[in-house]
């Protein structure tokens, strides 16, 4: 392998250590701790693991987490009422409603209802709009975490040819906005893109976030390129893999993220970061 690994566990730990220090400095001076409300509807096993990890990360840093585990029969009106209550609660700096929601509930409507200044996922249209007009507020955690990982490369992103594969609201679109803000020349590929290989072949930076295992082939990677893999898929043998054919890509790339241990740990670190940012703004 010729590529250097971008270690999200190590970088995430550094981010969290900095946050823990900030929190301790304020709370030792008598300020209340940051508060994150974590709302889960139903018992989807994958969501339960993510939510448990988020709560654990909060506890380690000194962030108070407020858990709301709702039955999957909860109505939209009841969920709306809970969000209204959390918006008003002065102990709460961040509200996270774990997605996906059961089919009878509207994720869009819930995201729109969260106070944009407590929207620590960065999903609210106001926060996406702020990012789009170069006035970032709370930034979507996964793309924000990727930007932090890219700092580790020491490379200047200005003028870089960046190709984002996937155009989801949660990752692909805000990722493109982050890279544009950083001065890259950005192409977004998606399900209607005609020649994905041709786009990837000319990229200095590839962010794969399509949710399709092995979609990005190693032989497409330009020599020395930075490869960021947001995908995570479990094979029948239990092993985890991303959207990129890692072994072949690592032979050509300059930097690459592993799966697991690349982007995943950064998402949680940046959720904590957003919660602390929101808390500090609220403390004044
Ligand atoms: N489901 C999968 N990823 C996420 C995330 O980052 N935030 C929320 N709220 N739900 C998710």
Image (cartoon, grey):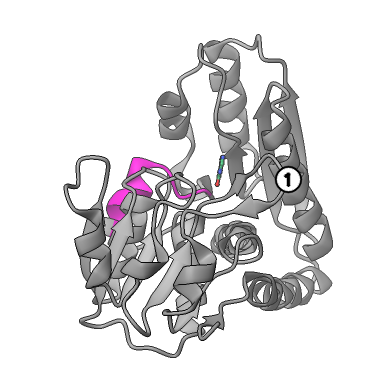
Is 179 placed above or below 83 here? below
Judge from the rendering whether residue 97 lies leftward or rightward of residue 238; answer left or right: left
Q: Position of residue 140 (x, y in %)?
A: 45, 54
Picture quadrant where residue 157 is located: bottom left
Q: Is mark 1 on a helix, strand or loop?
A: loop
* Nearer to the camera, 152 or 16: 152
Q: Position of residue 70 (x, y in %)?
A: 71, 21
* Nearer to the camera, 226 or 90: 226
Asked whether residue 91 appears in the rendered view, the answer is: no
Q: How many labels does the image show?
A: 1
Picture quadrant where residue 75 is located: top right
Q: Where is residue 28 in the image (x, y as percent from the top left)?
A: 83, 73
Q: Where is residue 242 in the image (x, y as percent from the top left)?
A: 53, 55
Judge from the rendering whether residue 181 lies leftward or rightward of residue 9; answer left or right: left
Picture quadrant where residue 49 is located: top right
Judge from the rendering whether residue 109 lies leftward or rightward of residue 46; answer left or right: left
Q: Does the magenta stretch include residue 13?
A: no
* Nearer to the camera, 52 or 227: 227
Q: Name the residue under label 1.
A: 238
Please state, as top left, top right, bottom left or bottom right, where the N terminus lies in the image.
bottom right
Residue furthest to the left in view is 194
Main SS type for the magenta part? Answer: helix
Is 154 placed above or below 225 here? below
Look at 56% across and 33% down and name the residue there.
Answer: 99
* Nearer to the camera, 87 or 16: 16
Please state, as top left, top right, bottom left or bottom right, where the C terminus lies in the image.
bottom right
Q: Which quarter holds ligand 1? A: top right
- Give the residues drawn in magenta, as a range: 121-131
Asked whether residue 121 appears in the rendered view, the answer is: yes
Is 40 placed above or below 131 here? above
């Amino acid at each position: 392998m010729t590529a250097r690994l971008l270690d999200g566990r190590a970088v995430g730990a550094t981010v969290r250590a900095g946050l823990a220090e900030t929190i301790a400095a304020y709370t030792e001076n008598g300020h209340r701790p940051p508060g994150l409300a974590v709302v889960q509807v139903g018992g989807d096993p994958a969501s339960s693991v993510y939510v448990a990890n988020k709560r654990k990360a909060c506890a380690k840093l000194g962030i108070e987490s407020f858990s709301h585990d709702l039955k999957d029969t909860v109505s939209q009106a009841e969920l709306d009422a809970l969000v209204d209550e959390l918006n008003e609660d002065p102990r709460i700096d961040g509200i996270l409603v774990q997605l996906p929601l059961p089919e009878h509930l509207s994720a869009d409507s819930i995201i729109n209802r969260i106070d944009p200044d407590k929207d620590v996922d960065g999903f609210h249209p106001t926060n996406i709009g702020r990012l789009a007009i170069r006035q970032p507020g709370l930034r979507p955690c996964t793309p924000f975490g990727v930007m932090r990982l890219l700092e580790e490369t020491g490379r200047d992103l200005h003028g870089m040819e960046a190709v984002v594969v996937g155009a989801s609201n949660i990752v692909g679109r805000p990722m493109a906005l982050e890279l544009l803000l950083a001065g890259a020349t950005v192409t977004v590929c998606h399900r209607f893109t005609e020649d994905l290989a041709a786009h990837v072949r000319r990229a200095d930076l590839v962010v794969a976030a399509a949710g399709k295992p092995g979609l990005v082939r190693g032989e497409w990677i330009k020599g020395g390129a930075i490869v960021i893999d947001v995908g995570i898929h479990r094979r029948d043998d239990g092993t985890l893999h991303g959207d990129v054919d890692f072994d072949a890509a690592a032979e050509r790339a300059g930097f690459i993220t592993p799966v697991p241990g690349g982007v995943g740990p950064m998402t949680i670190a940046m959720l904590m970061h957003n919660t602390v940012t929101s808390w500090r703004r609220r403390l004044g």
